Amino acid sequence: METLVDEIKRSLADRHVVEALAILTERFPGKVVFSTSFGIEDQVIAHFIFSNNLPIRVFTLETGRLFPETYYVWNRTLETYAAEIEAYFPDTCAVQRLISQKGPSSFYESIENRKECCRIRKIEPLQRALEGAACWITGIRADQSDNRQGMSQVEWDNTNQLIKFHPIYTWSLDDVWQFVKNQNIPYNPLHDKGFPSIGCAPCTRAVRAGEDFRAGRWWWEDKSKKECGLHATSS
Protein backbone atom coordinates (compact mmCIF):
# COMPACT_ATOMS: atom_id res chain seq x y z
CA MET A 1 0.00 0.00 0.00
CA GLU A 2 3.01 2.30 -0.30
CA THR A 3 1.59 3.93 -3.43
CA LEU A 4 -1.70 4.82 -1.71
CA VAL A 5 0.09 6.21 1.35
CA ASP A 6 2.37 8.33 -0.83
CA GLU A 7 -0.63 9.56 -2.82
CA ILE A 8 -2.46 10.59 0.35
CA LYS A 9 0.66 12.26 1.76
CA ARG A 10 1.01 14.35 -1.39
CA SER A 11 -2.66 15.36 -1.41
CA LEU A 12 -2.54 16.46 2.24
CA ALA A 13 0.85 18.18 2.22
CA ASP A 14 0.71 21.66 3.81
CA ARG A 15 -3.08 21.55 4.09
CA HIS A 16 -4.99 23.03 7.02
CA VAL A 17 -6.54 20.38 9.27
CA VAL A 18 -10.09 21.04 8.07
CA GLU A 19 -9.02 21.04 4.42
CA ALA A 20 -7.08 17.79 4.89
CA LEU A 21 -10.05 16.10 6.57
CA ALA A 22 -12.37 17.28 3.81
CA ILE A 23 -10.02 15.85 1.16
CA LEU A 24 -10.08 12.48 2.93
CA THR A 25 -13.88 12.45 3.08
CA GLU A 26 -13.96 13.05 -0.68
CA ARG A 27 -11.32 10.38 -1.31
CA PHE A 28 -13.10 7.83 0.95
CA PRO A 29 -16.80 8.83 0.99
CA GLY A 30 -18.65 7.38 3.97
CA LYS A 31 -15.56 5.51 5.13
CA VAL A 32 -13.66 8.01 7.28
CA VAL A 33 -13.89 7.52 11.06
CA PHE A 34 -12.49 9.30 14.10
CA SER A 35 -11.85 7.61 17.43
CA THR A 36 -12.03 9.85 20.49
CA SER A 37 -11.07 9.15 24.09
CA PHE A 38 -12.08 12.72 25.01
CA GLY A 39 -8.49 13.71 25.75
CA ILE A 40 -7.49 17.25 24.90
CA GLU A 41 -6.03 16.35 21.48
CA ASP A 42 -9.17 14.46 20.53
CA GLN A 43 -11.29 17.40 21.61
CA VAL A 44 -9.43 19.61 19.13
CA ILE A 45 -10.14 17.20 16.27
CA ALA A 46 -13.77 16.74 17.34
CA HIS A 47 -14.12 20.54 17.22
CA PHE A 48 -12.79 20.61 13.65
CA ILE A 49 -15.16 17.83 12.59
CA PHE A 50 -18.34 18.98 14.32
CA SER A 51 -17.88 22.74 13.73
CA ASN A 52 -17.44 22.16 10.01
CA ASN A 53 -20.10 19.43 9.64
CA LEU A 54 -17.58 17.07 8.12
CA PRO A 55 -19.05 13.66 7.15
CA ILE A 56 -16.85 11.69 9.53
CA ARG A 57 -18.25 9.03 11.85
CA VAL A 58 -17.08 9.69 15.42
CA PHE A 59 -16.87 6.88 17.96
CA THR A 60 -15.45 6.13 21.39
CA LEU A 61 -14.53 2.96 23.27
CA GLU A 62 -16.61 2.66 26.44
CA THR A 63 -14.36 0.30 28.40
CA GLY A 64 -16.50 0.34 31.54
CA ARG A 65 -13.56 1.67 33.57
CA LEU A 66 -13.53 5.36 32.60
CA PHE A 67 -13.11 8.30 34.99
CA PRO A 68 -16.25 10.27 36.02
CA GLU A 69 -14.50 13.31 34.52
CA THR A 70 -14.37 11.56 31.14
CA TYR A 71 -18.13 11.06 31.20
CA TYR A 72 -18.46 14.74 32.11
CA VAL A 73 -16.53 15.96 29.05
CA TRP A 74 -18.37 13.39 26.89
CA ASN A 75 -21.68 15.00 27.88
CA ARG A 76 -20.29 18.52 27.49
CA THR A 77 -19.13 17.66 23.96
CA LEU A 78 -22.57 16.38 22.98
CA GLU A 79 -24.19 19.52 24.40
CA THR A 80 -21.71 21.89 22.77
CA TYR A 81 -21.88 20.49 19.25
CA ALA A 82 -25.27 18.72 19.21
CA ALA A 83 -23.36 15.84 17.74
CA GLU A 84 -23.59 12.06 17.77
CA ILE A 85 -20.74 9.97 19.16
CA GLU A 86 -21.09 6.20 18.80
CA ALA A 87 -20.14 4.11 21.84
CA TYR A 88 -18.56 0.70 21.44
CA PHE A 89 -18.63 -1.59 24.47
CA PRO A 90 -16.56 -4.72 25.18
CA ASP A 91 -18.17 -8.10 24.71
CA THR A 92 -20.15 -8.82 27.89
CA CYS A 93 -19.32 -12.53 27.99
CA ALA A 94 -15.58 -11.86 27.58
CA VAL A 95 -15.61 -9.35 30.46
CA GLN A 96 -17.61 -11.74 32.64
CA ARG A 97 -15.12 -14.57 32.01
CA LEU A 98 -12.13 -12.35 32.73
CA ILE A 99 -13.54 -11.01 36.01
CA SER A 100 -14.83 -14.41 37.12
CA GLN A 101 -11.54 -16.19 36.45
CA LYS A 102 -8.99 -13.54 37.42
CA GLY A 103 -10.82 -10.89 39.46
CA PRO A 104 -11.34 -7.19 38.76
CA SER A 105 -7.67 -6.12 39.06
CA SER A 106 -5.71 -8.85 37.27
CA PHE A 107 -4.08 -6.26 35.00
CA TYR A 108 -1.78 -5.22 37.87
CA GLU A 109 -0.32 -8.72 38.14
CA SER A 110 1.49 -9.05 34.80
CA ILE A 111 1.92 -7.42 31.41
CA GLU A 112 0.17 -10.42 29.86
CA ASN A 113 -2.88 -9.90 32.08
CA ARG A 114 -2.94 -6.17 31.37
CA LYS A 115 -2.76 -6.77 27.63
CA GLU A 116 -5.58 -9.30 27.94
CA CYS A 117 -7.74 -6.67 29.63
CA CYS A 118 -6.83 -4.10 26.96
CA ARG A 119 -7.64 -6.62 24.24
CA ILE A 120 -11.09 -7.32 25.66
CA ARG A 121 -12.02 -3.77 26.60
CA LYS A 122 -10.33 -1.84 23.76
CA ILE A 123 -8.81 -3.81 20.90
CA GLU A 124 -11.77 -6.04 20.05
CA PRO A 125 -14.33 -3.18 20.28
CA LEU A 126 -12.01 -1.05 18.13
CA GLN A 127 -11.94 -3.72 15.44
CA ARG A 128 -15.75 -3.68 15.38
CA ALA A 129 -15.78 0.12 15.23
CA LEU A 130 -13.39 0.13 12.27
CA GLU A 131 -15.34 -2.39 10.20
CA GLY A 132 -15.97 -0.96 6.74
CA ALA A 133 -13.70 2.06 7.30
CA ALA A 134 -10.97 3.07 4.85
CA CYS A 135 -9.43 5.92 6.86
CA TRP A 136 -8.98 6.24 10.62
CA ILE A 137 -8.42 9.70 12.13
CA THR A 138 -6.59 9.90 15.48
CA GLY A 139 -5.34 12.55 17.91
CA ILE A 140 -1.78 11.24 18.09
CA ARG A 141 1.01 13.81 18.40
CA ALA A 142 4.70 13.06 17.82
CA ASP A 143 5.91 14.32 21.21
CA GLN A 144 3.50 12.18 23.25
CA SER A 145 5.99 9.31 23.50
CA ASP A 146 9.17 7.88 21.99
CA ASN A 147 7.10 5.27 20.15
CA ARG A 148 4.96 7.93 18.52
CA GLN A 149 7.92 10.00 17.35
CA GLY A 150 8.68 7.14 14.97
CA MET A 151 5.27 7.33 13.33
CA SER A 152 4.29 9.33 10.25
CA GLN A 153 1.36 11.72 9.89
CA VAL A 154 -0.08 9.41 7.22
CA GLU A 155 0.40 5.65 7.70
CA TRP A 156 -0.86 2.30 6.52
CA ASP A 157 -2.33 0.23 9.36
CA ASN A 158 -1.63 -3.32 8.23
CA THR A 159 -3.65 -4.97 11.00
CA ASN A 160 -6.84 -3.02 10.29
CA GLN A 161 -6.12 -2.61 6.57
CA LEU A 162 -6.72 1.12 6.33
CA ILE A 163 -5.08 4.52 6.15
CA LYS A 164 -4.39 6.30 9.44
CA PHE A 165 -4.15 10.08 9.56
CA HIS A 166 -2.98 12.07 12.56
CA PRO A 167 -4.08 15.67 11.77
CA ILE A 168 -2.26 17.38 14.65
CA TYR A 169 0.78 15.09 14.64
CA THR A 170 3.23 18.02 14.47
CA TRP A 171 1.44 20.19 17.06
CA SER A 172 3.07 20.81 20.43
CA LEU A 173 1.11 20.51 23.66
CA ASP A 174 1.24 24.31 23.91
CA ASP A 175 -0.33 24.54 20.45
CA VAL A 176 -3.15 22.28 21.61
CA TRP A 177 -3.82 24.22 24.80
CA GLN A 178 -3.78 27.58 23.02
CA PHE A 179 -6.30 26.35 20.45
CA VAL A 180 -8.59 24.86 23.12
CA LYS A 181 -8.61 28.09 25.10
CA ASN A 182 -9.05 30.32 22.06
CA GLN A 183 -12.00 28.25 20.81
CA ASN A 184 -13.49 27.59 24.27
CA ILE A 185 -13.49 23.84 23.64
CA PRO A 186 -14.71 21.64 26.51
CA TYR A 187 -11.95 19.45 27.94
CA ASN A 188 -11.40 16.87 30.66
CA PRO A 189 -10.80 18.62 34.03
CA LEU A 190 -8.25 15.92 34.91
CA HIS A 191 -5.86 17.71 32.53
CA ASP A 192 -5.74 20.52 35.11
CA LYS A 193 -4.76 18.01 37.81
CA GLY A 194 -1.62 16.59 36.23
CA PHE A 195 -3.17 14.03 33.84
CA PRO A 196 -1.78 14.70 30.33
CA SER A 197 -2.89 11.27 29.07
CA ILE A 198 -6.17 9.79 30.33
CA GLY A 199 -7.31 6.21 29.91
CA CYS A 200 -9.10 3.78 32.20
CA ALA A 201 -9.27 4.96 35.81
CA PRO A 202 -7.43 2.00 37.41
CA CYS A 203 -4.58 2.32 34.89
CA THR A 204 -3.98 6.09 34.92
CA ARG A 205 -2.42 8.40 37.50
CA ALA A 206 -1.26 12.01 37.50
CA VAL A 207 2.23 12.71 36.17
CA ARG A 208 4.90 14.06 38.52
CA ALA A 209 7.17 17.00 37.66
CA GLY A 210 9.88 15.88 35.23
CA GLU A 211 8.08 12.71 34.12
CA ASP A 212 7.25 12.13 30.47
CA PHE A 213 3.85 12.52 28.89
CA ARG A 214 2.72 8.92 29.29
CA ALA A 215 4.36 8.13 32.63
CA GLY A 216 0.93 8.04 34.25
CA ARG A 217 -0.32 5.25 32.00
CA TRP A 218 0.32 1.73 33.38
CA TRP A 219 2.84 3.34 35.73
CA TRP A 220 3.75 -0.02 37.31
CA GLU A 221 5.22 -1.29 34.02
CA ASP A 222 8.49 -0.65 32.20
CA LYS A 223 8.49 2.59 30.19
CA SER A 224 9.02 0.75 26.88
CA LYS A 225 5.66 -1.05 27.27
CA LYS A 226 3.49 2.09 27.45
CA GLU A 227 1.06 1.20 24.65
CA CYS A 228 -2.20 -0.74 24.85
CA GLY A 229 -2.08 -1.95 21.27
CA LEU A 230 -4.53 0.48 19.65
CA HIS A 231 -1.72 2.33 17.86
CA ALA A 232 1.06 -0.25 17.92
CA THR A 233 -0.01 -2.14 14.81
CA SER A 234 0.94 0.14 11.92
CA SER A 235 3.69 -0.75 9.51
Image (cartoon, rainbow, N blue to C red):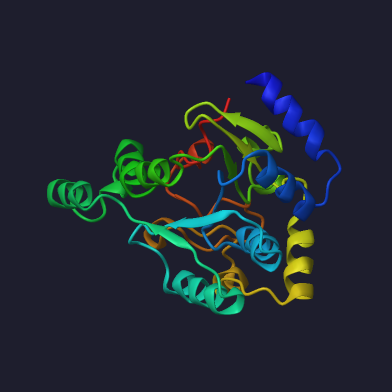
Instruction: Please indicate whether residue 94 sits to the left or right of residue 26 in the image.
Output: left
Is residue 167 depicted above or below 164 in this figure?
A: below
Is residue 59 depicted above or below 233 in this figure?
A: below
**Where is residue 167 shown, x and y percent of the image?**
71, 48
Instruction: Please indicate whether residue 117 sits to the left or right of residue 232 in the image.
Output: left
Tell me, yes or no, if residue 4 can be seen here.
Answer: yes
Tell me, yes or no, if residue 168 can be seen here.
Answer: no
Instruction: Please indicate whether residue 175 sits to the left or right of residue 113 in the image.
Output: right
Q: Where the C terminus falls, by quadrant? A: top right
Furthest residue toward top? 2
Report the residue at 69% width, 35% height from top. Answer: 154
Report the residue at 59% width, 61% height from top. Answer: 208
Is 23 or 144 nearer to us in this picture?
23
Report the residue at 48% width, 69% height from top. Answer: 70
How many marks overall? 0
**Where is residue 75 shown, x and y percent of the image?**
49, 76
Name the image quarter holding residue 63.
Answer: bottom left
**Where is residue 23 shown, x and y percent of the image?**
74, 44
Name the image quarter holding residue 127.
Answer: top left
Name the image quarter holding residue 134.
Answer: top right
Is 158 or 206 nearer to us in this picture?
158
Q: Where the N terminus falls, by quadrant? A: top right
Is 49 or 151 nearer to us in this picture?
49
Furthest residue toward left? 100
Is 51 or 73 nearer to us in this picture?
51
Is residue 50 depicted above or below 81 in this figure?
A: above
Report the residue at 65% width, 32% height from top. Answer: 155
